Image (cartoon, grey):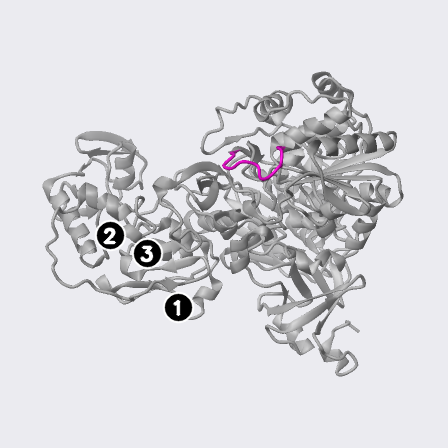
């Protein structure tokens, strides 16, 4: 610790702290423009100058490290005069257009001039003018260069945090101008973080421009619905109408940064696809009815299917309270454990459950970063703000970032080791890493332990065709602690169980080596962690406890006042099988759309069509709702309160900022409505009371209170479980693919089909595209921008080709987020990745067959 005195007050601070940080701990206000907490100091604005005893000149407090016994004065006549002069220089060329500037009322320059500026300017010259008109940098960002005060926050945020490098500066001194260079804006994330950090009105949000003033807005702090990172955001509404989103520098794990979906993608709440009234099917057509009519009809239909199987499917974008109440409704009123919470895969919970119980960390990501291994997916597009946090760890804390995936990512440039595996080859790649790690550290393990592991794992295979497992094993060996981040993209594959088993092997080996361990999933849905915790699973009750556990089941039944079926239920795959076989009486789907998401559209269509009674409860008229017999209009995001649990295990408040549209009711009210039709009553039934029950009955949530969920939320607790020291044999090495293999996932501008209902995101999003390697496209005679047909054994689609030089040979990627493509129509259940052929539109197969289409023969 180092002792420093500022304005007569003494404080002990950590060595390496800056004078500015010490002053803020004392509550002493020192103004800044260029300083941002998460960026390295620049010291260009000179607003934070202070006097330091023994120094001849004023020093920038943001870039001056404290020393033992340092004496600082933060407010003297010289400092005040200097600050006033700096502001006078900024105002000399700054346009005085505050009445029309969107930053008016929350402009840092306005505030600084009021607090520290001169009362009369000494400058009389004409103001410097760069451009007479504003510049449209992108569909969502507009620039007025004349207002820029050269703090360079935007440039540094774009490069050092976001990693896009879309902005830069030209010229110098008072002629410095921020601009986008040739081609750089094409790589812009459109995240708007430059707008957020701009202290003046130089960078502005085009969708919000001229819509409202800050004092007109009602602002609500809530949590982003677009992925599982759990970013804090503040929604501004005017007379109940959505206006904008901003973020706060001192709240949430994101600390003022958001991705494009979080900042510009919330206008989906006003989508034209909203379901206005309840609907029932008459003569093959859905017709609007009143809630009373819907209730009478649903009561009759539920009676008609009494005694047949029932099942439920709920979206992991719903709040904990809704999900908890849904599984309670299904288990007590419908007497079934056949419930699931993903419309894209069936979770192999027999493997996943023990893995999570033993290793899942519920802690801030930035506290468990030392050596980080990311497995699968593409963090930059699935969880963009998590990408920012990882990049920050690499650049500021020397985090060792390791990557193992089929799909390249922008984070590869920051990684120490990148292992590229073939599509579907994650399990084989991990097995090679595990075997290499055992071989590399065998001398540190007891002989009997090593022999037992070796007998199960075997020796590294030279036939995997994967480059780099040995380097990855060596990097893992060096780390003091290791955090494994697992993309849920891995759960799509039929090899998901084998991949999870190899992750289990890896974590056990690292544990034997004495490493500190943490594991977290990179969920791309806002509350997937909460959905699992709440027990929206066929084999697990709330708290991830087995349905077959008589003690747990009895305790919950006693609290709920109703019995719970004792046997495990059917997962999504098995539910659809029951439907196709004509054995499903009632299927209740809440907030999700399996017809567009499940990897076999024809199969789902047949399953839903064969269901005796299909009930869909949703805010939007989805493809699945179009097949329903009963449609119930539900409140959407922002129209009801509750909580989300993010990827870290952090529980946060989701707040209401608008009223439910049309005749929609809250999801909880609809559950009460349906339960009453089954002659049941769900108690409790309000969000606050349900939260209290969760905090009482779910072990990881015990002790939590609503008042204790502050701006940063609160962490649920990992329930200590002794890991079973079991090792799994490696999977067979898959044969080298001789065909193009299709995988899917999120793209940067869309995350699931919710975001496609955002008009703003649709203005910045790419058209539907097919991404392939330069090597494959050259072999096929294709060029960037071509319209191509992607054909599988199941179907085909047409989209624009994007050639990506980072893509490995044999890989085809199509984003899953475009409804018009009906991508799942190409796929067959149980087959992922999907073998495909790619052909240029209008090309003739018979002509130049080998160059136009690659069949691998």
Quadrant of residue 857 within the rendered picture:
bottom right
Residue carrying label 2: 45
Position in image of residue 257 (x %, y %) = 44, 47
Q: Is residue 48 visible?
A: no
Position in image of residue 607 (x %, y %) = 82, 47
| Residue farthest to the bottom, as pictured | 847
Which sits earlier in the primary sequence, circle 1 or circle 3? 1
Main SS class of the magenta portion in the image: loop
> Which range is magenta?
654-666
The correct choice, above or below, for 812 with respect to 612 in the image is: below
Q: Is 151 positioned to the left or the right of 250 in the image?
A: left
Looking at the rendered structure, the secondary structure element under dot 2 is: loop
Residue carrying label 3: 202
The correct choice, above or below, for 778 with respect to 636 in the image is: below
Q: Is 308 positioned to the left or the right of 195 in the image?
A: right
Nearer the camera: disc 3 or disc 2 = 3
Which sits earlier in the primary sequence, circle 2 or circle 1? 2
Residue depicted at x 69% and y 17%: 559
Who is closer to the viewer here, 838 or 763? 763
Q: Is residue 471 magenta?
A: no
Residue carrying label 1: 181
């Amino acid at each position: 610790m180092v002792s420093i005195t500022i304005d007569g007050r003494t404080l002990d601070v950590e060595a390496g702290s800056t004078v500015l940080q010490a002053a803020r701990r004392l509550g002493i206000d020192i103004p800044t423009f260029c300083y941002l907490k998460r960026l390295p100091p620049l010291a260009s604005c000179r607003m934070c100058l202070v006097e330091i005893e023994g120094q001849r000149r004023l020093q920038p407090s943001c870039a001056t490290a404290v020393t033992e016994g340092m004496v600082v004065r933060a407010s003297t006549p010289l400092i005040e005069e200097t600050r006033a002069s700096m502001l006078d220089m900024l105002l000399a060329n700054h346009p005085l257009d505050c009445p029309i500037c969107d930053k008016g009322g929350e402009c840092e320059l306005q505030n600084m001039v009021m607090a520290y500026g001169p009362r009369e300017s000494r400058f009389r010259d004409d103001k410097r003018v760069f451009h007479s008109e504003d510049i449209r940098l992108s569909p969502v960002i507009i620039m007025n260069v004349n207002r820029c005060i050269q703090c360079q926050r935007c440039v540094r945020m774009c490069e050092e945090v976001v990693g896009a490098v879309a902005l830069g500066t030209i010229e110098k001194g008072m002629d410095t101008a921020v601009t986008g260079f040739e081609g750089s804006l094409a790589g812009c994330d459109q995240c708007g973080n430059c707008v957020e950090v701009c202290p003046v009105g130089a960078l502005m949000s085009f969708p919000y421009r001229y819509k409202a003033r800050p004092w007109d807005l009602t602002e609500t702090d809530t949590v982003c619905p677009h992925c599982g990172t759990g970013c804090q955001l503040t929604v501004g509404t005017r007379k109940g109408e959505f206006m904008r989103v901003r973020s706060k520098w001192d709240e949430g794990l994101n600390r003022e940064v958001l991705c494009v979906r979080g900042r510009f993608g919330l206008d989906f709440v006003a989508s034209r696809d909203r379901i206005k009234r309840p609907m029932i099917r008459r003569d093959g057509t859905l017709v609007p009815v009143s809630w009373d009519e819907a209730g009478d009809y649903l009561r009759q239909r539920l009676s008609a299917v009494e005694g047949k199987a029932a099942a439920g499917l709920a979206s992991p974008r719903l709040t904990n309270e809704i999900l908890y109440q849904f599984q309670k409704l299904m288990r007590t009123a419908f007497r079934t454990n056949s419930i699931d919470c993903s419309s894209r895969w069936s979770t192999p919970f027999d493997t996943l459950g023990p893995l999570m119980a033993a290793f899942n960390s519920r802690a801030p990501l930035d506290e468990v970063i030392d050596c980080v291994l990311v497995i699968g997916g593409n963090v930059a597009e699935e969880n963009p703000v998590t990408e920012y946090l990882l990049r920050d760890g690499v650049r500021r804390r020397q985090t060792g970032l390791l990557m193992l995936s089929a799909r390249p990512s922008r984070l590869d440039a920051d990684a120490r080791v990148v292992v590229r595996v073939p599509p579907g080859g994650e399990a084989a790649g991990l097995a090679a890493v595990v075997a290499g790690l055992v071989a590399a550290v065998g001398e540190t393990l007891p002989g009997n332990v090593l022999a037992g592991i070796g007998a199960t794992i075997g020796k590294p295979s030279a036939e995997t065709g994967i480059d780099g497992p040995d380097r990855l094993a060596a990097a893992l060996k060096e780390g003091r602690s290791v955090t494994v981040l697992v993309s849920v993209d891995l759960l799509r594959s039929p090899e998901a169980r084998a991949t999870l088993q190899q992750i289990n092997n890896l974590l056990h080996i690292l544990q034997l080596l004495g490493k500190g361990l943490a594991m977290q999933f990179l969920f791309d849905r806002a509350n997937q962690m909460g959905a699992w915790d709440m027990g929206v699973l066929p084999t697990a009750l709330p708290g991830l406890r087995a349905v077959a556990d008589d003690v747990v089941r009895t305790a919950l039944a006693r609290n709920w006042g109703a019995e719970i079926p004792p046997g495990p239920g059917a997962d999504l795959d098995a539910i659809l099988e029951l439907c196709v076989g004509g054995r499903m009486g009632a299927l209740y789907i809440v907030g999700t759309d399996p017809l567009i998401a499940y990897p076999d559209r024809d199969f789902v269509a047949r399953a839903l069509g064969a269901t005796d009674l299909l009930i869909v409860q949703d805010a939007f008229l989805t493809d699945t709702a179009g097949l329903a017999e009963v449609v119930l209009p539900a409140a959407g995001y922002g129209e009801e309160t509750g909580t989300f649990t993010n990827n870290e295990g952090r529980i946060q408040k989701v707040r209401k900022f608008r009223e439910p549209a049309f005749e929609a009711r809250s999801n909880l009210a609809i559950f009460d409505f349906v339960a009453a039709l089954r002659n049941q009553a769900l108690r409790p039934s309000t969000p606050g009371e349900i939260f209290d029950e969760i905090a009482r009955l779910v072990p990881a949530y015990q002790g939590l209170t609503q008042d204790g969920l502050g701006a940063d939320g609160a962490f649920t607790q990992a329930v200590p479980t002794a890991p079973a020291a079991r090792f799994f044999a490696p999977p067979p090495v898959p044969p080298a693919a001789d065909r193009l293999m299709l995988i899917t996932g999120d793209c940067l501008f869309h995350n699931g089909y919710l975001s496609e209902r955002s008009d703003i995101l649709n203005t910045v999003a790419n058209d539907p595209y097919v991404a392939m390697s330069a090597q494959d496209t050259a072999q096929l005679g294709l060029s960037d921008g071509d319209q191509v047909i992607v054909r599988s054994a199941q179907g085909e689609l047409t989209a624009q080709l994007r050639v990506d030089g980072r893509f490995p040979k044999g890989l085809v990627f199509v984003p899953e987020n475009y409804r018009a493509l009906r991508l799942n129509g190409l796929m067959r259940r149980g087959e992922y990745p999907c073998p495909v052929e790619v052909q240029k539109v209008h090309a003739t197969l018979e002509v130049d067959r080998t160059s136009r289409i690659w069949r691998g023969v």
